[in-house]
């Protein structure tokens, strides 16, 4: 009779033992991960000490002063930049812009519209290894040229397209 009782309770005890061991292992693993995450210098090093928002550049009224505020020289025209815009924008408040750069080591892409109240319209800093392909929508005050500026390999390149705006979006 004693062996019959033991055989009935043994599977329950084994299952509970396994569950306790798994619970302890999970708790120990979670505690180790939590403790090892404290003081990770890599997380703090990834965050810049000073914001990279170039506020002065976004308030410039002309292309030359916006370039100067960014610390950039005049760009050189390049056929390796694909700037896709509509020829005629029915609504200047939402003009789609797509820029792709077929060059290595692209660090940033900027969109400038010299006839807008503020010339620098968008700035996209890119991490190393990021595909140099951006798309956005911009506001245009009136018919104007749109300039895409690409910083790559320590040099500046540009592409320009004219867009006719039938309904103003800003200004």
Image (cartoon, rainbow, N blue to C red):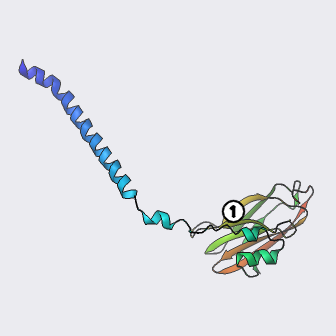
Front one among 1 and 65: 65
Residue 70 shown left or right of residue 64 in the figure: left
Q: Position of residue 22 (x, y in %)?
A: 28, 41
Q: Residue at x 21, y 27 (%)?
A: 12
Name the image quarter holding residue 68.
bottom right
Decide: is 100 above or below 12: below
Q: Quadrant of the C terminus?
A: bottom right
Name the image quarter holding residue 4.
top left
Residue wearing tag 1: 134
- Number of numbered tags placed on the structure image: 1
Q: Position of residue 152 (x, y in %)?
A: 65, 76
Q: For numbered disc 1, what is the local secondary structure?
A: strand
Decide: is 18 above or below 2: below
Callout 1 crowding tier (Cα within 10 Å): few <14, some 14–19, many ≥20: some
Q: Position of residue 168 (x, y in %)?
A: 90, 57
Name the image quarter holding residue 120.
bottom right
Q: Position of residue 72 (x, y in %)?
A: 71, 79
Front one among 120 and 109: 120
User: Can residue 79 be seen in the rendering of this structure?
Assistant: no
């Amino acid at each position: 009779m004693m062996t019959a009782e033991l055989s009935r309770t043994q599977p329950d005890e084994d299952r509970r033992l396994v569950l306790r061991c798994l619970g302890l292992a999970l708790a120990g693993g979670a505690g180790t991960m939590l403790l090892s995450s404290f003081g990770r210098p890599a997380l703090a090093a990834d965050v810049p000490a000073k914001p990279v928002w170039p506020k002065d550049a976004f308030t410039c009224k002309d292309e030359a002063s916006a370039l100067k505020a960014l610390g950039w020289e005049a760009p050189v025209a390049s056929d390796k930049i694909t700037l896709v815009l509509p020829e005629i924008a029915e609504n200047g408040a939402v003009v789609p812009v797509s820029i792709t750069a077929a060059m290595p080591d692209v660090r940033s892409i900027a969109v400038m519209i010299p006839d807008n109240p503020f010339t620098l319209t968008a700035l996209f800093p890119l991490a190393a290894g990021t595909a140099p392909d951006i798309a956005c929508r911009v506001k245009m005050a009136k018919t104007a040229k749109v300039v895409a500026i690409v910083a790559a390999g320590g040099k500046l390149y540009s592409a320009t397209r004219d867009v006719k705006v039938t309904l103003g979006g800003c200004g």
